[in-house]
Image: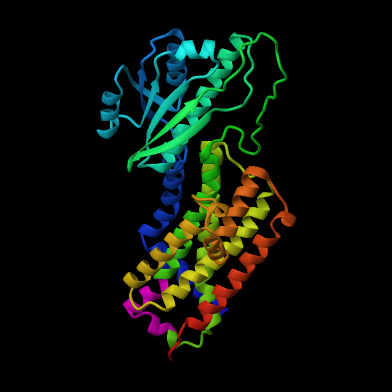
Amino acid sequence: MMLKYLLEKEFKQFFRNAFLPRLVIVFPIMIMLVVPWITSMDIKDIKIVIVDLDRSSYSEQLIHDIDASSYFLLQDVIGNYDDALKKIEYGYADAIMEIPSGFEKNLVTKGSTPVQLSINTVNGTRGVLGGSYLGSILAGFSQKIAAKSAVLPQSIGAESSVEYTTASSSTATLATPSAPLQMTAVPNIQLITQNRYNPLLDYKLYMIPALMVIILIVMCGFLPALNIVGEKERGTIEQMNVTPVSKFTFIIAKLIPYWVMGILILSICMVVAYFVYGLYPKGNILIVYLFSFLFIFGISGFGLVVSNNSNTMQQAMFVMFFFVIIFQLMSGLLTPIRSMPEWAQWITVFTPPRYFIQMMRLMYLKGGSFSDLSTELFALIGFLIFFGLWAVISYRKRG
């Protein structure tokens, strides 16, 4: 009975605040509509300048192939490498490809020719992927030339060597595969790639399930962290301390409203994901809600722990902000956990969002069952119990 009155008090306090009910609705919708479009690891619109010293039909065809790619923006085709290098230095270009004199002649007579590629590597990811994209275009171009000449290349892919010239650029020499000038066909191996679970390689589909988790952390972690400490600052907590309410009942009454709010927020995110991005769970949706129940209670308990041990709302906000940043960086949201250093992978074992994000991506993109999620299930149960008990113990009730 006492729990009923405490819950009534919590919900009345929530709805009396004109800002919080609007925040619960508007915040997840805006994040789901905006962030997936701007948080992308796809590298496109790489500005390239081509130095064409050959001016042949083959060089024109190669330039056309690069210009037709959605990854590159052809800025200019010029005849001087020094002028092209100035465009990189002044930020007008990201890469330079130099087609040497005798490009077509060497391809016809020798079956191979060097092509110099210079890339601005201040942004290492953009530089490496840009070089990889150009290497793929060169490999495809050499295949087409070989097919026209009825010559099959002896190797697959482009040879490359990297020579660092300055702190902001690197130079790579890419060569098309060499082949003997003969008209007889030789066995050829074709590699056909089949992308599973995300066939179009749409990065938004990979990000959206994890983004829902971050929204829950912000809403169901930050707000509880400001709850008890807010009552401390207003002085209303003293009225609660003189009542016979047990610490356990008090903490449960604080957690349940945020659990209800978290389930509502998750449902809003799932509706937006379905109608805007066409993304829905491939697995059982009840499993998603079960894991959400565990995660929301756990992260809200963590927020109450922070609130219990803070003296001011400002202190609680800074502490929660610190942990939210850690959760984002160490949970696999942006960087795959297996790509992290081994010591960092061990740290991720103690971050609750890691397990919830793994579950969300599995259920949304691949589909799965409890047998696939046993580790995540027991981890979230453990975090729920740990933070729940810690929240009860850390609450200092003074009569």
Q: In the rendered view, would you say 4 is above or below 171?
A: below
Instruction: Find the magenta span and give its range.
Output: 227-240
- Main secondary structure found in the magenta portion: helix
Q: Nearer the viewer, residue 58 or 324?
A: 58
State left or right for residue 175 relative to residue 101: right
In the image as oriented, which residue stretches furthest toward the right? Answer: 371
Q: Quadrant of the N terminus?
A: bottom right
What residue do we see at 58% from left, 53% from top?
A: 338
What residue do we see at 47% from left, 75% from top?
A: 305
Q: In the rendered view, would you say 287 is above or below 303?
A: above
What residue do we see at 42% from left, 45% from top?
A: 30
The mark tally for this picture is 0
Q: Nearer the viewer, residue 251 or 300?
A: 300
Q: In the rendered view, would you say 77 is above or below 355?
A: above
| Residue 39 horizontal/vertical position (percent) | 44, 43
| Residue 191 horizontal/vertical position (percent) | 67, 28
State left or right for residue 207 relative to residue 318: right
Residue 39 visible in rendering: yes
Q: Quadrant of the C terminus?
A: bottom left
| Residue 14 horizontal/vertical position (percent) | 42, 65
| Residue 203 horizontal/vertical position (percent) | 52, 39
State left or right for residue 323 relative to residue 338: left
Residue 282 visible in rendering: no
Q: How is the image coloured?
A: rainbow
Q: In the rendered view, would you say 266 is above or below 193?
A: below
What residue do we see at 58% from left, 64% from top?
A: 349
Q: Is residue 282 magenta?
A: no
Q: Nearer the viewer, residue 83 or 275?
A: 83
Image quarter for residue 225? bottom left
